Amino acid sequence: MNIILVEPDEIQENCVRFVDHRAEHIVKVLRSERGDTVKIGQVDGKIGSGTILEIKKKYPFCVELRLQLTDNPPPKPLIDLVLALPRPIMLKRILSQVTALGVGTIHLINANRVEKSFWEASILERQEYRTHLLHGLEQAVDTRLPEVMLHPRFKPFVEDFMPDISDEYGSCICAHPLGTKVLSDVVDSVTDRLLLAIGPEGGWVDYEVEKFQEQQFSCCSIGSRILKVDTAVIALHSRLSALQEFAG
Amino acid sequence: MNIILVEPDEIQENCVRFVDHRAEHIVKVLRSERGDTVKIGQVDGKIGSGTILEIKKKYPFCVELRLQLTDNPPPKPLIDLVLALPRPIMLKRILSQVTALGVGTIHLINANRVEKSFWEASILERQEYRTHLLHGLEQAVDTRLPEVMLHPRFKPFVEDFMPDISDEYGSCICAHPLGTKVLSDVVDSVTDRLLLAIGPEGGWVDYEVEKFQEQQFSCCSIGSRILKVDTAVIALHSRLSALQEFAG
């Protein structure tokens, strides 16, 4: 936890009181004392510091702080993600990791090779996936929660929803081992927003690739090595970030 | 498992007999029949196919194949890794993931913020870490096992060992959030071998950064977002690969 996040409705007259894992973190990991300051951010708000007014170092832990939130969070990430719904345990890790790397919106969509049962997982409940997004923000020192959208049907997503949002993007990229383009062919401006679509284990089926291509997605490969989805998401995000930086 | 790997000493007169998870994979995942061929590679050897001579589809599974291993594996990866020993559960995942991405040698070294107990983990025994390397190769369709070297003392590694190997590399990179360079400053040839050093959770201490700099490592940052080690390893590897591809 490189920043402690507070929800807007937890703040009263610029003060906040922790009695949960955040209090424990301040006591046991940071080993702070009364009068010390710790790094604090407000979810979807500003970043700053909290000065410890009271601290109870024995269980149950309790810490009261006065906040000074003055700095803007990092700019909104330039990459949005379309992700064929992975198995729940992998999705948890991916949500934290891509939030740490920086992502604007995550569209979780259905695909032929997505197991039906994945759509019933409790991780798809807002209160549960939000925890993993917060972990990513706490790691990366950010406050901006990615938006998560669920699209349990492939065709309405690609045919009806995509045309509504495609104008926002300089490039839309469909990751595919047989893609004929490489990422550097399609990333040519540092300020463009990018939409990156990553398939399920086993990949997109041909029909899905065609549908993405109809929506002006470029099919890109990152080489012949086949990666698991959790590795591929980080690898593609990082390669795109490197190319954007280099273009700048 | 996108390729099934066999050890050299399992092959007799071009035939091999599986009675373990590989037999189960052929029966239950690939659902192969007698006469079918499956993708096979010999560890540290060639890639090709195996034709099923006999198959027992009920537990205990058994599959006999005749091998035709004719193709060379992918070229040796251009990136080697120096990694401050992570906690065992994270190391397992990192070993599989970087092997899938492609890595030549992995030096696991000590650092100030490495917990002493990590050096006693069973994952550091060859027979155990090898399993995770093999998973990475099976995923990426490769046969070339990365070399893993353990360096339980930091100073001898950086002062005595590094000078012996540094000639092999076009660039040596020390990942550091406060690094003043970016990766694109130090990657300028597609054919150079690269050595990438990644610190423990909490980062390298100043002394360690200085020692790396004495050995001509460039200190590079990938931005202000702080990443967990498992995310950082994939992110840095992928960014370097993207830049190498782009240079080519």
Image: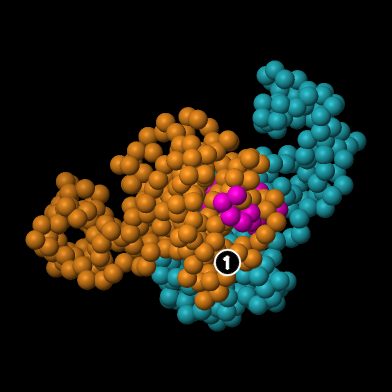
Chain colours: A cyan, B orange
Q: Is residue B73 above or below residue B202?
A: below
Residue A63 seen in the figure: yes
Residue occupying the point 33% across, 59% down: B144
Residue B225 part of the magenta segment: yes
Is residue B178 rendered to the left or right of residue B188?
Answer: right
The part of the chain drawn in magenta is B214-235
Across and down, in percent, residue A175 comes to 51, 70
- Quarter of the image for residue A60 reads top right
Q: Which residue occupies the foreground of this view, B48 or A24?
A: B48
Across and down, in percent, residue B96 comes to 41, 51
Instruction: Using a 10 Å C-alpha cutoff, classify the residue at mark 1 as few (fewer than 14 neighbours), some (14 to 19) or many (20 or more).
Output: many
Q: Residue furthest right?
A: A13
Amino acid carrying mark 1 in the image: Val
Q: Is residue B139 above or below residue A133?
A: below
Residue occupying the point 53% across, 48% down: B230
Across and down, in percent, residue A80 comes to 64, 64
Residue occupying the point 57% across, 79% down: A185
| Tally of numbered discs | 1
**Secondary structure under the numbered disc 1 in the rendered image:** loop
The chain ID associated with circle 1 is B
Q: Which residue is mark 1?
A: B187
Is residue A248 rendered to the left or right of residue B234?
Answer: right
Residue A93 seen in the figure: no
Q: Residue furthest left?
A: B13
Q: Is residue B153 above or below residue A208?
A: above
